[in-house]
Image: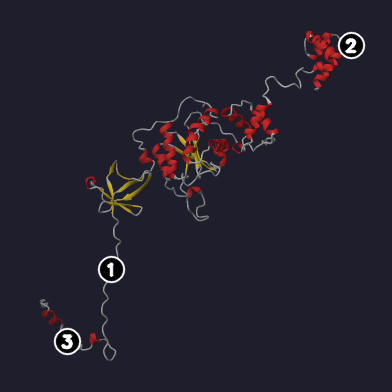
Amino acid sequence: MTQAERDRLVALKKAKKKLITQKQAAEELGITERHVRRLLRGLKRRGDKAVSHALRGLPSNRGISADIRQEAVTILAKPVYAGFKPTLASEYLAKHHGIHASRETVRQWMIEARLWRARKRRVEKIHEWRPRRSRFGELVPWDTSDHDWLEGRGEEMLLINMIDDATSRWFARFVPSDSTVENMNVLESYMKKRGRPLAVYTDQAALFKTAQKTRPGEFSAAGDRPELPPTQIGRALRELGIVWIPAYSPQAKGRVERGFATAQDRLVKGMRVAGVTTLEQANQYLEAEFLPWINATLAVAPASADDAHRPLENQHDLAAILSHVESRRVNSDYTIQLETKIYQIARRDICAGLRGAVVRVEKRRDGSVAVRFRDRYLSVEQCAQRPAATAVKPAAKPKPQAGPTGRKEWGRNFDLKKAPKVWQAAQESGRRKAI
């Protein structure tokens, strides 16, 4: 019996003994006089239990039977559901096994079956809150998560996620490595589906920012550092008109990091139940199950209905922009060299000013090579490697032989007094005598 029920019983017994009127008892208990009379009749029939609900201690008419409860506990005890939290467990019970129970009911079942341990929620460190951007596509945080996504059942892979800041809508892909090519592939898929965002928000990894190699203390201030050339992704973003914003702390990427925490819990367990073992199966599950759920459940409506994404124009050749681009100088024989390979420019594409000019060489993601001079592409063909030039050593001059006395033979019979005059030597050589 609760304290409120004890207080009600005291007031009813006063009214029963005529110490107070039924009207005074009703005012004291905050109920009507009719209800006071009803309670007095129940007090006469049932005694003190009249102030308690008649169904207390009895099973609920809407309660779940013990058989269904035992079936749910048996299912959740299987190894495939290890680590499931109550919310996710209640969703899988309803979706895959037809057992409909609230999150709190499943939580109580799991606590009693020792499948879940109740614990107090810790107060986390509070960081300064940053408001969301107002439009869809105005800012897109972009990051990669390295995690054991398949729990050792298959190959190692990473998850690249581009999550919109205004709506928390995901665009993600599993990839074998965090390389420039894989990130460009994800960026291309994003733009073909949604368009070009205004800005992307990433960390300062080597994929997005060229590292400055300096000795300690060589530059005293950041303003003294020379401007470094952009990375391949940085160059591509410039050509696409997308602003790159670097993050200077992990907390700055809080939205995408919290998204990865959700994926490392729900996505891992979902792929475990689905029996995913390969990269292709993981991307299929991601597209068919996880992304529709997270974009429908956790996404929010933007403050503005305007879509900030811009369409791809005719000048946006994604195959050329999203490639490895370098500059090369054309040799005198109209060839260029790239990664120890020599490419010959076709004769029909040779024009004035090409020899010695700097051309743009694009090593594309499909393995092909494209060369652009000014505003047109040149036909090139890989040719044989030039033979390496070998240095020819000059023939060694014969050394003069020494005489029997050890002196050299070249001036042995020379007598300066018997030698001809200079003008005589000139006449003998066919030259005229000077006047």
The amino acid sitting under disc 2 is Lys
Q: Name the residue under label 2.
A: 17
Kindly report the distance in space between the C-alpha atoms of the residues bearing marks 2 and 1: 132 Å
The amino acid sitting under disc 3 is Ala
Q: Residues within 10 Å of mark 2 (few under 14, many from 20)?
A: few
Residue 240 location in percent, x, y?
Answer: 40, 37
**Among the two numbered marks 3 and 2 on one chain, the one whose residue lies closer to the N terminus:** 2
Q: Which of 422 and 271 is in front in this view?
A: 271
Kindly report the distance in space between the C-alpha atoms of the residues bearing marks 3 and 1: 41 Å
**Among the two numbered marks 3 and 1 on one chain, the one whose residue lies closer to the N terminus:** 1
The amino acid sitting under disc 1 is Val
Q: Which residue is drawn at 34% across and 48% down?
A: 327
Q: Residue at x 65, y 27 (%)?
A: 68
Residue 366 location in percent, x, y?
Answer: 36, 43
Q: How crowded is mark 3: few (under 14 residues within 10 Å), some or many (20 or more)?
A: few
Q: Mark 1 points at which residue?
A: 392
Q: Which of 48 and 238 is in front in this view?
A: 48
Residue 359 location in percent, x, y?
Answer: 31, 47
